[in-house]
């Protein structure tokens, strides 16, 4: 069935159309080289489903590998010329791109808002294969379709309750004084704001994802980052992306001053968004901050931990942005910080980071206290070697796995990490001599994706859900919270 894609307006990220023309020319010149290099490197990085049938790799090694090598060599001169053009105009570029489609009527009842964060792992094909994922272009389209379709079909309300369809393990409880429903659900809830990471490393993939999201979200920010030799060696943007059903009043992006190893190639930082909400005389606004912290921090003896420095900057930037953009008569309805923090509340390696003051400013709803999560909290980082396991290839299959402690430990990383290095991506669940998973209180509990409301705001958290709708499409589990003002 054909899907309607709304008319989309792409706003110019440069001060004049001439710069945009140069940008488009530069990208066209760089595209053959970047694509050939990406595909050439991909030949050396088979994923587990390909390794299971090694005879299928023969045509890659003997046909495509030599072809991509020749094409890479031939495309170097034109690609380098395109890079020089692109690099020369980056100082004139804004730190983000903005696209919008025709807005639709919003029916906000009792000031209910839902926020979802998701790491989509839409890296270039060769980098995605390090995470045991492939077919990046298809995944971008499919992820956008899944998210948008859930909004259009109105399967969920803002509290995460199922209207159409079923789920076997939606749990309900009251935590302390909060009437907060929590659980694991196989479809996206009706989400007002999407905080995405690793969603826009490449503009072509970001716009393919955006075309689908625009069916449900009129306002999208993507290609976010600051390109310079000091910020990211002019290699990659932040990967952040943001989609909203409400108008965007102001946007800013701040790159982190400290990064480590591979993160020096990306313009990681904090996306800051000021949103225009319902108006009842005074202007009512909301603030959302989206980030992606240092990955694989390792053990940096004698050096200030990178994540601690990044979170220090985030506290300062959030306060500065609100002071700069809020008016004297503005009513702030919510203040949300979310994203992929690459740390959890229980692992020994993250013990210092999870005590950072930022968790005193914003509330991590999944933790009982520092070092201890609620029993209902689920890990959000899948074991990469098992992302293609048939049991978790469907939303309901992954939802079922997360409802069983042993299965969750089988497919989700444990929160007992002692040194954060790329090796943890290869970890499997510990088993006894009979091959059975050894139960552990930390099993499957590495929860690194957060959506946190600022403490002290006049909001009631009504829902907290782990969303399995993107099963088979990414190596993270999205997290959603609902607020009532």
Image: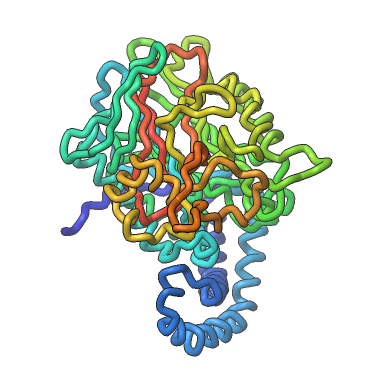
Nearer to the camera, 106 or 67: 67
Percent coordinates x, y for residue 362 in the rendering: 54, 23
Q: Residue at x 41, y 82 (%)?
A: 56
Residue farthest to the front?
A: 433
Left or right: where 198 falls relative to 220: right
Quarter of the figure with the C terminus: top left
Give x and y (percent) for residue 386: 44, 58
Q: Quadrant of residue 244?
A: top left
| Front-most of residues 328 and 223 | 223
Determine if residue 265 is in view: yes
Q: Position of residue 464 (x, y in %)?
A: 37, 29
Q: Nearer the viewer, residue 308 or 254?
A: 308
The answer to whether 100 is drawn above or below residue 27 in the figure is: above
**Residue at figure coordinates x 27%, y 47% from the top left:** 396
Picture quarter containing residue 206? Answer: bottom left
Work out whether 247 lies above or below 229. Answer: above
- In what quadrant of the picture does the N terminus appear? bottom left
Left or right: 313 in relation to 479? right
Q: How is the image coloured?
A: rainbow
- Which residue is depicted at the point 33% across and 48% down? 398
The number of numbered discs placed on residues in the rendered structure image is 0
Q: Residue furthest bottom?
A: 62
Viewer can see residue 11:
no
Answer left or right for 321 relative to 329: right
Counting from the top left corner in percent of width and height, residue 107 is at 23, 25
């Amino acid at each position: 069935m054909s899907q309607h894609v709304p008319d989309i307006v792409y706003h110019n990220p440069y001060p004049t159309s001439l710069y945009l023309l140069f940008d488009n020319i530069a990208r066209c010149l760089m595209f053959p080289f970047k694509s050939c290099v990406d595909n050439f490197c991909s030949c050396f990085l088979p994923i587990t489903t390909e390794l299971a049938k090694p005879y299928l790799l023969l045509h890659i090694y003997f046909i495509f590998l030599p072809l991509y090598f020749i094409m890479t060599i031939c495309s170097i001169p034109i690609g380098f010329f395109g890079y020089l053009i692109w690099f020369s105009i980056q100082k004139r570029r804004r730190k983000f791109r903005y696209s919008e489609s025709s807005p639709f009527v919003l029916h906000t009842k009792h000031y209910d808002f839902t926020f979802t964060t998701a790491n989509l792992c839409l890296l270039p094909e060769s980098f995605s294969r390090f995470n045991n994922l492939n077919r990046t272009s298809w995944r971008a389209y499919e992820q956008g379709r899944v998210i948008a379709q859930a909004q259009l079909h109105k399967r969920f309300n803002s509290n995460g309750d199922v209207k159409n369809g079923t789920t076997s393990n939606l749990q309900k409880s009251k935590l302390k004084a909060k009437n907060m429903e929590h659980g694991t659900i196989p479809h996206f809830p009706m989400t007002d704001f999407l905080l995405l990471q690793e969603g826009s490393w490449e503009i072509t993939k970001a716009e393919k994802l955006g075309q689908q999201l625009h069916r449900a979200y009129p306002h999208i920010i993507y290609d976010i980052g600051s390109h310079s030799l000091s910020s990211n060696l002019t290699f990659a943007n932040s990967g952040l992306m943001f989609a909203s059903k409400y108008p965007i009043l102001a946007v800013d992006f701040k790159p982190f001053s400290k990064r480590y190893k591979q993160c020096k190639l990306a313009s990681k930082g904090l996306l800051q968004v000021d949103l225009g909400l319902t108006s009842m005389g005074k202007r009512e606004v909301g603030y959302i901050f989206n980030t992606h912290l240092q990955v694989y921090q390792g053990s940096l003896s004698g050096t200030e931990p990178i994540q601690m420095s990044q979170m220090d900057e985030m506290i300062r930037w959030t306060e500065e942005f609100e002071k700069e953009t809020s008016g004297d008569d503005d009513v702030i309805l919510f203040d949300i910080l979310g994203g992929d923090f690459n740390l959890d509340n229980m692992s020994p390696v993250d013990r210092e980071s999870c005590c950072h003051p930022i968790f005193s400013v914003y509330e991590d709803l999944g933790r009982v206290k520092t070092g201890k999560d609620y029993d209902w909290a689920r890990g959000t980082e899948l074991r990469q070697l098992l992302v293609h396991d048939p049991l978790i290839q469907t939303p309901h299959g992954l939802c079922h796995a997360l409802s069983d402690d042993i299965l969750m430990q089988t497919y989700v990383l444990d929160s007992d990490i002692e040194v954060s290095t790329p090796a943890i991506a290869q970890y499997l669940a510990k088993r006894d001599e009979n091959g059975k998973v050894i139960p552990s209180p930390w099993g499957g509990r590495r929860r690194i994706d957060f959506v946190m409301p600022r403490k002290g705001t006049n909001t009631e958290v009504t829902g907290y859900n782990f969303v399995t709708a993107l099963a088979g499409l990414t190596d993270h589990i999205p997290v959603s919270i609902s607020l009532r003002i």
